[in-house]
């Protein structure tokens, strides 16, 4: 009987200790400055609705049509998506085409936050009316999507003469789809767009975390990311999940993963007689040096995404019209595109 009582006392002690540990851990973290996860408000409004759709191969695609989009109740811009699913480029069709040039990338290439006639791809088109530019940039894309797009167009009847890949440091986490990016994409998109759950439910996102060769894998929208219960209320839960996510990312060589993809894109273009340029939108010196050593042609823009003069900060960090002018000038100068005599 005494042994049973002793066992009961031990179990009660264990329970009491566990009960005390949780609030003590929470209190200790708060004293050290830790907080529950705070979701930053990000609001997207569009007239008409659904400028962006889910895609089973690339994650996100552009819905054909003209849209008036508003970001965070402040930044307004007009975007037109053509029948091919690309941001519209206005070109004088009466002028003969001497080169087809494709611009690949994410929302920076797409021109999120600026009008059709303010994107750097449009400015290139305006400055070189004898070339045919195609803006294949889409919000949320990494270099993996650009690689898949390149594979498709290289094998098409309208294979380009020049490919411009626009790369930003943000792509380092997008290409292997690290946990922090999956969260930003899933939770952020759901919170910013009321129709996200419906339009994205069948989408799948490609990623690659291999080095030396590209191995494409996919993850569906439903499985993209979930916050642990209570993360928005508990500093302890947020601390543990954040640590878990970082541990997952720490095993990845982000620079080598992205470098592998870009080198393969350069090879694919070389094998098909296409001129390839990797445009470094912001500073990623380790990747730039590595690519140069492999013979990849680099164009460095040096855009500062924290500079309010070239971005839409504090409302949105995407480049404004001045930022797009800076990108245009860097590409235009280093591509040595000569203006034709008309």
Image (tube, rainbow, N blue to C red):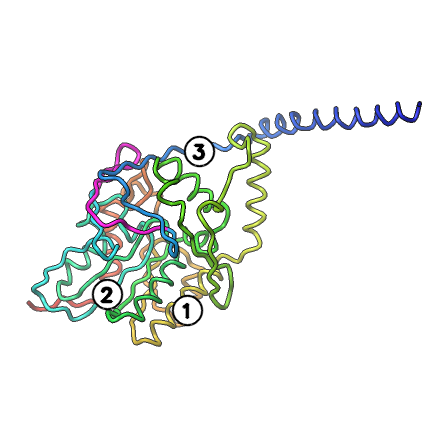
Q: Residue at x 38, y 45 (%)?
A: 200
225 relative position to 191: left or right: right
Q: Which residue is mark 3?
A: 39
Residue 264: give its label. 1
Residue 170: give its label. none
178 relative position to 239: left or right: left
**Would residue 61 be counted in the magenta stretch?**
yes
Task: Report, in whole angstroms, how far the alpha carbon at label 3 lies from the one at label 2.
Answer: 39 Å
Are there few (<14), some (14-19), or many (20+) residues within 10 Å of tag 3?
few
Viewer-side residue, 63 vs 252: 63
Q: Which residue is mark 2?
A: 101
Badge 3 element: loop
Name the quadrant of the N terminus: top right
Compared to 326, does 241 lie above or below?
above
Q: Position of residue 235 (x, y in %)?
A: 56, 30
Compared to 24, does 296 lie above or below?
below
Count the marks.
3
Name the quadrant of the C terminus: bottom left
- The overriding secondary structure of the stretch rendered in magenta is strand
């Amino acid at each position: 009987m005494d042994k049973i009582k002793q066992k009961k006392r031990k179990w009660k002690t264990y329970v009491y200790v566990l009960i005390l540990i949780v609030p003590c851990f929470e209190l200790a973290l708060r004293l050290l400055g830790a907080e529950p996860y705070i979701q930053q408000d990000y609001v997207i409004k569009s007239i008409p609705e659904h400028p962006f759709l889910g895609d089973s191969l690339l994650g996100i695609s552009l819905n054909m049509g003209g849209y008036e989009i508003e970001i965070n109740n402040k930044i307004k811009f007009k975007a037109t998506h053509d029948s091919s699913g690309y941001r519209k480029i206005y070109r004088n069709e009466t002028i003969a085409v001497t080169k087809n040039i494709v611009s690949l990338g994410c929302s920076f290439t797409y021109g999120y936050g600026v009008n059709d006639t303010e994107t750097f791809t449009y400015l290139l088109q305006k400055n070189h009316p004898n070339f045919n530019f195609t803006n294949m940039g889409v919000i949320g894309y990494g270099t993996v999507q650009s690689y898949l797009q390149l594979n498709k167009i290289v094998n098409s009847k309208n294979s380009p003469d020049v490919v411009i890949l626009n790369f930003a440091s943000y792509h380092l986490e997008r290409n292997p789809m690290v946990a922090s990016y999956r969260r930003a994409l899933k939770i952020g998109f759901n919170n910013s767009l009321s129709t996200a759950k419906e339009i994205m439910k069948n989408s799948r996102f490609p990623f690659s975390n291999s080095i030396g060769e590209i191995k494409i894998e996919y993850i569906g929208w439903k499985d993209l990311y979930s916050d642990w219960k209570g993360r928005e209320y508990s500093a302890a839960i947020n601390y543990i999940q954040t640590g878990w996510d970082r541990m997952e990312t720490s095993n990845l060589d982000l620079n080598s993963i992205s470098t592998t993809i870009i080198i393969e894109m350069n090879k694919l273009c070389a094998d098909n007689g296409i001129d390839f340029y990797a445009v470094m939108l912001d500073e990623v010196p380790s990747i730039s040096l590595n690519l140069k050593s492999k013979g990849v042609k680099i164009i460095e823009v040096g855009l500062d995404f924290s500079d309010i003069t070239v971005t839409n900060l504090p409302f949105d960090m995407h480049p404004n019209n001045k930022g797009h002018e800076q990108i245009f000038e860097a590409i235009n100068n280093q591509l040595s595109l000569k203006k034709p005599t008309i």
